[in-house]
Image (cartoon, helix red, strand yellow):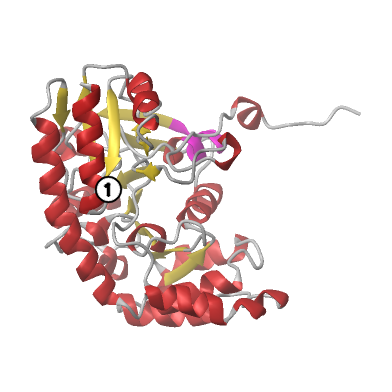
Amino acid sequence: MKIQIKSSIIRHVPVVHGGRNPSQSIDSQIIDFSSNVSPIGTPLSVKKILKKNIENIQHYPDFSSSTVISSLKKYTNLEKSNLIVGNGAIEILYNFCFAFLSKKTKVLIPIPTFQEYETASKLNECQISYFKTMNLSKNLDSFISKIPKNGCVFICNPNNPTGQLLLKNQLLQIIKKAKKLSTIVFVDECFIEMVPESNESIISYVKKYKNLFVLRSLTKSFALPGIRIGYAAGSKEIIKILQKIKIPWSVNSLAQDAANTALENKSHLVKSNFVIKKELNYLTNKISKLNGFDCNNSSTNFILIKIMKDSTQLQKKLLEHKILIRDCKNFRGLNNHHIRIAVKSHKDNLKLVKALEKIK
């Protein structure tokens, strides 16, 4: 029997991301600068609740993550009907594309950016257009002129990997134009809570614009990548459809406990952003002085760096110093002369700078 497989799946190539890869037997002592999570780590309160509730793994989790939705209502000042929880932000992204995108859908993606927008769109056989820019705010009018009719626009804000931040009024220009064209604007705000001294989130606008969908993650802000918990906000109509296709029990009980506890700990974000602001300046100043290293201006907890060396070779050399960085050659719009580093503690950042000074 010949199994029929969608051509989009046959062509599908999974994206390679940053972070430790256990299958590669990486030394546990290696400092991971390749994944962008809070530089102060996981809140102690979250660790305590996970230890306390470990016995709950013998029971099925809350099917609808109702307690997390209640916590998010308080956290975001949105209605429960505007919110959905997922097994990481990535589950919500793929469900969104499955529900709302098809062969007829024209998709606009500024590049370089998070690659999963492209991958999820391709799996649904969309017609994708790319807009190359290292700073969308400088090319905003041109970008807006490219917005398709009856389509979808993906915006990562702040953008991964460039760290560039669009202001609220700039995003609203995109949303308003897209609304006139019956196009959905998907705004990924997974890093928005790690932009020090800023208030550019547009999550509250989902109540006003039915063509707006905002993705959030607790992975980055509260350092919970291993738990897998994310959420999104949108119109009641969009959320209702996504609830219909949501995989049953996709968010485990410990993830729900972690989310409820983390969302009560806003002081963690304040402390994290204090470190990010200080250490972002430190890393940018130190690395920019090295020959062959050009740091992109970043608003958040990571820095894209253009280098003269080959990115893969530099990654290998830094591993000898027990440091893992993100090789950015697989980002559409970048090449093998780009790397990305996370902003970490001063102790770790100092080790990175010293290693780069030795390698140069």
- Based on the displayed image, in which of its 4 quarters is residue 18 positioned? top left
Tell me which segment is drawn in magenta: 119-127
Three-letter code, disc 1 = Asp
Q: Quadrant of the N terminus?
A: top right
Above or below for 305 versus 337: below
- How many marks the image carries: the answer is 1
Farthest residue in the right direction?
1
Which residue in the structure is indicated by mark 1?
A: 348
Residue drawn at x 20%, y 32% is 134
Above or below for 252 versus 36: below
Residue drawn at x 33%, y 19% is 336
Q: Who is closer to the viewer here, 165 or 184?
A: 165
Q: Who is closer to the viewer here, 64 or 235?
A: 64
- Residue 106 is situated, as x and y percent measured from the top left of the image, at 41, 36
Q: Who is closer to the viewer here, 263 or 123?
A: 263
Q: Secondary structure at mark 1?
A: helix
Q: Quadrant of the C terminus?
A: top left
Residue 232 is a magenta residue? no
